[in-house]
Image (cartoon, rainbow, N blue to C red):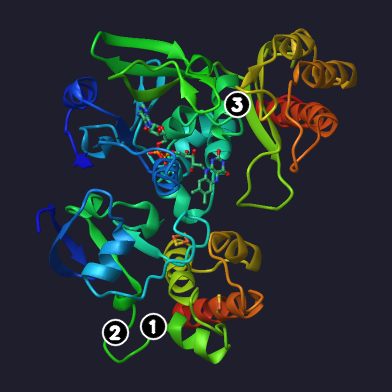
Amino acid sequence: MSGIAVSTTINGDDVEFLCQAEETLLDVLRDRLGLTGAKEGCGTGDCGACSVIVDGRLVCSCLVLGAEAEGRSIETIEGMADGEKLHPLQEKFLEHAALQCGVCTPGFLMAAKDLLTRNPDPTEEEIRFALAGNLCRCTGYDKIVRAVQDAATVMKGA
Amino acid sequence: MQYTRPTSVNDAVSLLAEAKGTAVVLAGGSDLLVRMKGGFVEPDLIVDIKSIDGIGEIRQTADGFAIGAAVPCAVMGEDEALKNAWPGVVEAANLIGSKQVQGRCTVTGNLCNASPAADSVPALVAAGARAAIAGPGGNRTVPVEEIPTAPGKTSLAKGEIIEAILLDKRAPRSGDAYLRFIPRTEMDIAVVSAGVNLTLDEQGVVTAARVALGAAAPTVLLVAQAAEALIGTAADEDALEKLAAACSAACKPIDDKRGTVEFRKKVAGVLARRAAMIAYKRAGGK
Ligand SMILES: Cc1cc2nc3c(=O)[nH]c(=O)nc-3n(C[C@H](O)[C@H](O)[C@H](O)COP(=O)(O)OP(=O)(O)OC[C@H]3O[C@@H](n4cnc5c(N)ncnc54)[C@H](O)[C@@H]3O)c2cc1C
Ligand code: FES
Ligand code: FES
């Protein structure tokens, strides 16, 4: 198949792929690279289920072209746990039952991780603002906010 | 469809100028990719400008600031010098979308998308910002309000791209502010909005002002009468009342599910008055 040859880094690994010009990074991650953690909720930037971090910036992978990944460093939910050891955010999401169907969860985790990297001690209001680009149809958000608060406390102590 | 990533402005301009079919500029993609998915645009060529040398930087020049066309709004919010000089422009840019959208969207894209409700545009117009344009016929610089001509339409000719948005160096005792009305607290489109920029003399009297309204007409409105109401005053009650009335009168809004004509007119005045008070304080007025 012809296509655009792209070399990039995903979760620290060098990755090469071919894609078509119109394919989004989300399509590439899911359909070409088998990284199905990022989800497609809307495809138009509204729900955040496809959130990944590109060169240190949280973005919706549904609004990035696969070809734009050339030379970038991408973090996805698959790189969040350290082997079998879950990230504190993942542990706290489980502990606080901050998920039901789970479709929104990878996006929330990436957005929360980005928030805590920039602001290790956010207020509840800051957490709610930072996660405004992530929609959840199940939990009512409260448990998600508690989980992020609790993870922040644990991470500060670490 | 083809995708290209030129590394110089000249290459980007030639690619766009010489393209057969529909050629489009890609900056943050937060409008373009949504429009492509919706089938509203089917480009033959995408010219990604983000690898052009220097276009992703905010530069401080002798004349002020040059915000490169590929600078994401999140980066504007992290630039202390820019935030200090132009807090209204930065707060408007940072209202766009979510954290995810902030990581990608640009004020140049916001301007070129030509939505009447674009958040950064009234703030840029109030600030007297200019667009530095490169094109097949050479370079030109125009006031930003001359870029959008109708919803979704701009005055840019084939092959022209905006390289940077230019903001002047600040006179002492200057301030700007931007406010929008949305029914939610974030992630929504402005029902109506207002940007105000002003400069004071040592006594706190307004010597220069610009007032712009968003989502109040097919394109951004620069309301000269509202600015005149402020100039020569200390932004007292009487002046603010006149400013609000001038803004309400200047609106030519649409009626839709997000707001009636009457509501938009009224709120345009209210927001302009509040933005003027914030700008006045930021300029050091009491
Ligand atoms: C979920 C979501 C929420 C949003 N919320 C808001 C909001 O609250 N307020 C708001 O105002 N907007 C909002 N938007 C719209 C959008 O994010 C902005 O308009 C954004 O600023 C566009 O910038 P961009 O760099 O992503 O543009 P792109 O999508 O890359 O480009 C937009 C248009 O401008 C053209 N263009 C871009 N750069 C140049 C250039 N240098 N020279 C010539 N033409 C150029 C492109 O060809 C395209 O037609 C939202 C979008 C999404 C997806
Ligand atoms: S799928 Fe990307 S934001 Fe919804
Ligand atoms: S857990 Fe179902 S959408 Fe959030």
Task: Tell me the amino acid under the disc marked 1.
Answer: His
- Secondary structure under badge 1? loop
Distance (Cα) linking label 2 and label 3? 46 Å
- Secondary structure under badge 2? loop
Which sits earlier in the primary sequence, circle 2 or circle 1? 2
Q: Do the residues labelled 2 and 1 touch (CB within 8 Å)?
A: yes
In the rendered structure, find residue B26 and report the number of the disc placed on it.
Answer: none
Pointer 1 residue: A87
Pointer 3 residue: B122
- Ligand 1 near label 3 (Cβ, under 8 Å)? no
Pointer 2 local density, CA inside 10 Å: few below 14, some 14–19, many at least 20: few
Q: In this view, does A15 lie to the left or right of B25?
A: left
Distance (Cα) linking label 2 and label 1? 7 Å
User: Residue, x 30% and y 30% (percent of image)?
Assistant: B22
Q: State whether discs 2 and 1 lie on one chain.
A: yes
Ligand 1 falls in quadrant: top left
Residue B199 visible to an observer of this rendering: no
Q: Position of residue A56 (x, y in %)?
A: 33, 58
- Ligand 3 near label 2 (Cβ, under 8 Å)? no
Q: Quadrant of residue B263?
A: top right
Camera-side residue: B19 or B123? B19
- Secondary structure under badge 3? helix
Which subunit holds the residue at mark 2?
A: A
Name the quarter where the N terminus of chain B is drawn. Answer: top left
Task: Tell me the amino acid under the disc marked 2.
Answer: Asp
Q: Are marks 2 and 3 in contact (CB under 8 Å)?
A: no
Pointer 2 residue: A82
Camera-side residue: B85 or B17? B17
Q: Where is residue A89 in the image (x, y as percent from the top left)?
A: 46, 80
